[in-house]
Image: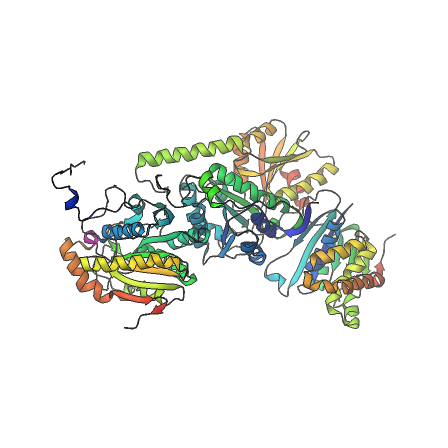
Amino acid sequence: MKELRLMKGNEAIAEAAIRAGADAYFGYPITPQSEVIEYLMAEKPHERTGMVVLQAESEVAAINMVYGAAACGKRVMTSSSSPGISLKQEGLSYIAGAELPCLILNVVRGGPGLGTIQPSQSDYFQATKGGGHGDYRLLVLAPASVQEMYDFVKLAFDLAFKYRNPVMILSDGVIGQMMEKVEIGEQYARLTNEQIDELYPWATTGKKTGQDRRIITSLELDPGRQEKHNLKLQAKYKKMQEEEVRYESLNCEDAEYLLVAFGSSARICQKAMDLGRAQGLKIGLLRPITLYPFPSEVLNDLASKVKGILTVEMNAGQMVEDVRLAVCGKVKVEHYGRFGGMIPSPTEVLQALEQKIIGG
Amino acid sequence: MEQNFDLPEIHTPENLVYTKTKVLTDNVMHYCPGCGHGTTHRLVAEVIDEMGIQGQVIGVAPVGCSVLAYNYFDIDMQEAAHGRAPAVATGIKRVFPDKFVFTYQGDGDLAAIGTGETIHACNRGENITILFINNGIYGMTGGQMAPTTLPGMPTSTSPYGRDVKMMGNPLKITELVAMLPGTYFVTRQAVHTPALVRKAKKAIRMAFENQKLNRGVSFVEIVSNCNSGWKLPPVQAIKWLEENMLPFYPLGDIKVNGEMVSK
Amino acid sequence: MIEEIIIAGFGGQGVLSMGKILAYGGLMQGQEVSWMPSYGPEMRGGTANVTVILSDERISSPILSQFDTAIILNQQSLDKFEKSVKPGGLLLYDPNGITRHPVRTDINIYRIEAAAEAARSGMVKTFNMIVLGAFLKLKPIVKMENMEKGLAKSLPLRHHKLIPANMDAIRKGMELAEPVAVIA
């Protein structure tokens, strides 16, 4: 029988990391995600699977520990919340530049600055447009349930290694702190050093006799070669756009009005949609699961069928820009947001839809 | 520019007294003539060769003059962000506890922007080797003040000499890390005379051998000269090093086998 | 079946664990459940609340502004959540420390003297289970056998010896629920 547990999103991520065969976690405590490292430490993964868990002296150190271990071909992750993720941006840029696979979890809280510890989605720009310096992208997954927090860990590692690119799970305080039913999956074995040598010839595992040394770096001083490297990265992002777009659509077939939301906002929108449908309003919901690559095509298609689109985000209007780009002016696109840790209620969302789209 | 060094009448086995270690690549080093980096690179490479660990060692290069160190060592290497090498090395060593892991860092990298990473890697007792080149100046960026710049020493950002009242004091980070329980071997060496080169090599060898013991960080500072940054010809730079750097940064072992060396 | 519940009181009253045990009970009988707490410094001695949803179908929003049931354990929470009970819904509260009592006439209002009973019996720590028992009497959405399983899942092994006492407290609470104002 499948094992079912009631878990917080943060705990589900941690359990999933052990089960996915992760080799190491490096992190630093910050609310609202400290349960990730607390759970890992309590579980003694070094005894369960040999996974390394280390509390670093800073977010900066943690992401650079990730760099070092990821460059060895290991499955490595870190987690933090918004202010800590800002600190990690230097390391993330280097990781993207050096093409290292790894998983970063951001359990977003309200900002800017120290902001609040309450849930928010105000790091959408940071997550999807690069975040640090230079032209790079993370592949960004947005879970909307505790089960997805669990499931996306294995997926994230697989994608990270497929593309040799950092993958971010962009969650928030709601998904991190809430408990839901989780179906616990199987225990995947950690790769052996021999398997790593075979699968990832780029990894620095110690130079093999008669073979070239491996160098992991993001430095290339020659502009011609640096441009070539950038073009290679861009080709990789294009491939992600072609192959990795994920979304969920609910009631879009007959929808006259479309809600677009990700993560916990999508859950709230689902309730708002149900409330609206009960009143006879034909509302649909499109939930981007990958925020980068963004599901632009399906949105463009839906824009031809609906009378208006409302994006609902716990921020001042970030994803709405990508929705507008996707829709290309075909239909009215408005944004409804709460921020600073405030969470919109389903009734509030329905009212906003009525005011801004249906009546507007 | 290609030069022909093919001199068969001289290149005979009986004339062979010294050869470049195979752990160094054939890439021409970019370091300034007379700089201590080249010598230190050679010592590290020789130790790796002599220990027979070329296939088991992973090096971490810094940001600074030795940013391209990975071009010269024929081993697997990673390039770290500025100051983060001890964290990167921690990540490597934690997933590969049986490999030999070292960082190679300058004073700005290790003792300014990377102070936190240095202190905490040392305090945790990561089983790694840290090689620290201290020449009292930022070489790569063109001679700015470093955390180890001496009082009164002119640099491009202390053009009238380091005023410690305004700019703070030079940091003796080697003495500082020796105080931490996680360091096992801490020493200060130099490479500007043949005798010192031999001593430095012994220290570097011990710093790598120690990794087999799993007792914590081995930390080797090399006090070096920066002719370009100091704006002195090599011979005068070495004289300046002996007269100014060494009195402030005295050579010798500070901590051996986990015990402080009494002076 | 879907039951949307807010449980609110002081930090330390066992609000979050009551919600967790209820949610685990739902999970044990194959339902979808969600448990969404208020979190942060307010947990430490201030007010704490948790939204618990049990449903036969996939749960949409874990955050709600209207509830089928409000379980209220202090004055601030009563002031805050009385208005959030859906018309026809249930408000269950412990009158201990309450000076301004609920006034709505379109909902069912019950009281549970859980603090008094816990003090009387000397089992102060089972206070929240007495409250939970009263709720389960009024809305028997989780079977007792599944509550017992839920308790076993939520409590760490070293506390499993306390399960019988907790079940007794739930049964006690079932006896003690009293109507205050019941709509026709």
Name which residue lies at 19% across and 51% down: B228
Q: Which quarter of the image is occupied by the N terminus of chain A? A: top right
Magenta residue check for B228 = yes
B101 vs B27: above or below:
below
Q: Nearer the viewer, residue B73 or C37?
A: B73
Name which residue lies at 46% across and 57% down: A56
Image coordinates for residue A179, horizontal then vertical, percent:
65, 51
Image coordinates for residue A353, horizontal then vertical, percent:
65, 39
Q: Quadrant of residue C74?
A: bottom right
Image coordinates for residue B237, horizontal then vertical, percent:
16, 57
Residue A145 in view? no
**Image position of A146 (left or right of B170):** right
**Image position of C144 (left or right of B109):** right
Magenta residue check for B97 = no
Name which residue lies at 37% across and 67% down: B258
Report the label total: 0
Residue at the extreme front: B14
Residue at the extreme right: C184
Name which residue lies at 72% across and 59% down: C18
Q: Which quarter of the image is occupied by the C terminus of chain A? A: top right
Q: Quadrant of residue A152?
A: top right
Magenta stretch, residue numbers: B223-229
Q: How is the image coloured?
A: rainbow
**Image position of B39 (left or right of C101):** left
Q: Quadrant of residue B159?
A: bottom left
Residue A170 in view? yes
Q: Nearer the viewer, residue C110 or A264?
A: A264
Q: Nearer the viewer, residue C169 or A273?
A: C169
